[in-house]
Image (cartoon, rainbow, N blue to C red):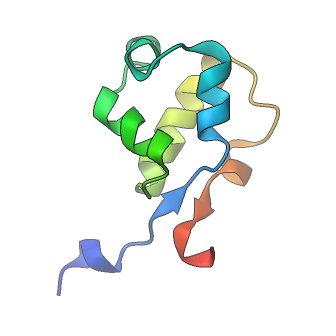
């Protein structure tokens, strides 16, 4: 059985609001945060991502802008919805 299937997937419900505060589009945010625009599109749509991807996005965002909340509090396991 694939280990990827068993992996927990996470969402950040506040992400669309966080990105909208400082960036007009996913392309602008991708350029500023140095991440793939497709990853940002998935995250804005609410698609669950691996925890490491969320932590990378949020830490890069936090290095440029104030989150106001600890990074670990923003990432929620999608199975707990």
Pick whichever, 25 or 50, lies toward us. Answer: 25
What percent of the width, then of the height, locates residue 52?
Answer: 44, 50
Q: Report if residue 67 is visible in the image.
A: yes
Residue drawn where x is 66% and y is 30% of the image: 18
Indicate left or right for 52 with 55 as reference: left
What percent of the width, then of the height, locates residue 72?
Answer: 68, 51
Indicate left or right for 68 with 72 as reference: right
Tally of numbered tags? 0
Instruction: Point out the image quarter for the C terminus.
Output: bottom right
Residue drawn where x is 18% and y is 80% of the image: 2
The residue furthest right is: 68
Residue drawn where x is 65% and y is 25% of the image: 62
In the image, residue 51 above or below residue 21: below
Q: Report if residue 36 is visible in the image.
A: no
Indicate left or right for 17 with 60 as reference: right
The residue furthest bottom is: 1
Instruction: Point out the image quarter for the N terminus.
Output: bottom left
In the image, residue 81 above or below residue 24: below
Q: Give residue 23's quadrant in the image.
A: top right
Pick whichever, 9 or 42, lies toward us. Answer: 42
Pick whichever, 65 or 29, lies toward us. Answer: 29
In the image, residue 47 above or below residue 36: below
């Amino acid at each position: 059985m694939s280990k990827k299937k068993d992996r927990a997937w996470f969402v950040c419900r506040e992400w669309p609001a966080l990105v909208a505060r400082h960036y007009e589009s996913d392309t602008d945010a991708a350029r500023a945060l140095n991440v793939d625009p497709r990853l940002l599109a998935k995250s804005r749509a609410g698609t669950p991502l691996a925890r490491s991807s969320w932590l990378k996005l949020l830490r890069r965002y936090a290095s440029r802008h104030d989150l106001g909340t600890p990074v670990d509090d923003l990432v929620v396991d999608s199975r707990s919805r």
